[in-house]
Amino acid sequence: MKPYSPYFSRPYEDVAADLESYAKLLEKWQSVQNLVSRETLKDVWSRHFADSLQLLTLTQASDRLFLDLGSGGGFPALPLAIASKGSDRKFVLVEPIARKVSFLRTVARELDLNVSVIGRRSDQIDSRETGVPDVITSRALAALPQLCAWMEPFFAAHTRALLHKGAEHVDELSESGAHWLYDVLIQPSDTDVRGVMLTLTNLRRKSVS
C-alpha cells in the first residue's frame, strides 16, 4: 500500500484506517450479498485494495470527476475515493443491483466519502446525470468491445478510461478494433503478473462506409 501513498490526499495512516473499516463492512455484507469472490476476501488488501489504488499512478492533478461503471463491491472506485478523501475529487458509481447499491451507499456514508451511487445500468443513464467525467474506471465488468459501447456516451475530448484487464487484453483490443477507434497505452499491472492497465483516450465509433 505504501508505494501509492505519495498519491494520497492525506496521511497514509488515515487512509489505512478507512480501508480497514471498508474491509470490515465488506466482510459483514459478504454473508448476504456476493460482493467479491470468496477466495479473494481473505486477500482483500492485495487482491482488491492495492489493485484498485495502482490507478492513482495514472491519474492527473486536474482529474476531478470519476465515473465508475459496474461498481459491484466498490472496486476500484471506493479505494480511490478513500485515498482522495478531503480533495475536490468526486466519484460517481453506477451499479444496477439493489443490494450492492445499498452496500456502496453505506460505505460512502459511514466513511464520509465524496461518492454518489446511481442504481441503474449505464445504458439506462443520461450522461447529463453524471456530468462529463475526467476519468472512467471499470474492473471485471465486460470485455472491451462491450465496455467501449457503454463508455462512449460519457466520453468527451478530455476523458480517459483507466481499465483493469487480464491476459485476454490482446484479444479484446483486436476484437474492439472492428468497431471502435481509440488511442491506448498499455502498462503492466502491479498486482497481477498477467494483468495490464489500459489507458484509453479519443474513444469513438468507427464510421460505417
Image (tube, grey):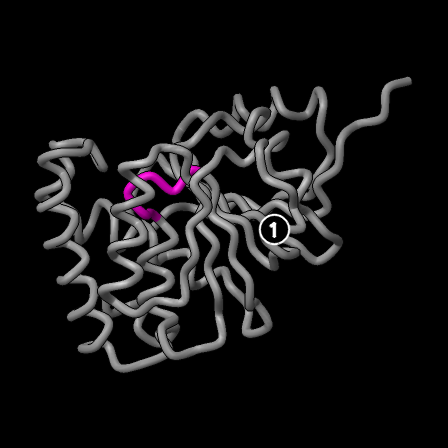
Q: Decide: few, some or many residues near mark 1? Use Cα within 10 Å; few <14, some 14-19, many ≥20.
A: few
Residue 155 position in % (x across, y down):
68, 47
The image shows residue 43, relative to residue 109, as above or below, that is: above
Please determine whether, in this image, residue 128 is positioned above or below residue 90: above
Residue 72, x across and y down, in percent = 33, 39
Q: Residue at x 73, y 46 (%)?
A: 202
What's drawn in magenta, residue-wise? Answer: 70-75
Indicate the amino acid at tag 1: Glu
Q: Is residue 192 above or below residue 9?
A: above
| Image location of residue 145, percent across then percent down | 59, 25
Residue 148 sits in which quadrant? Answer: top right
Q: In this view, does 100 lie to the left or right of 46?
A: right
Image quarter (top left, top right, bottom left or bottom right) of the C terminus: top right
User: How far across and down, in percent of the image, does residue 93 sit?
Assistant: 44, 49
In the current view of this chain or complex, which residue is farthest to the bottom?
11
Picture quarter containing residue 34? top left
| Left or right of 119, for residue 124 | right
Question: Which image quarter is the N terminus in?
Answer: bottom left
Residue designated by label 1: 129
Say whether residue 183 is magenta.
no
Query: Looking at the image, which is closer to me, 126 or 134?
Result: 126
Majority SS type along the magenta span: loop
Between residue 67 and residue 143, name the one nearer to us. Answer: 67
Circle 1 — which element?
helix
Q: Is residue 70 left or right of residue 108?
A: right
Report the residue at 22% width, 64% height from top: 110
Going 70% across and 20% down the picture, which residue do you hit? 178
Q: How many numbered marks does the figure carry?
A: 1
Q: Residue at x 38, y 42 (%)?
A: 71
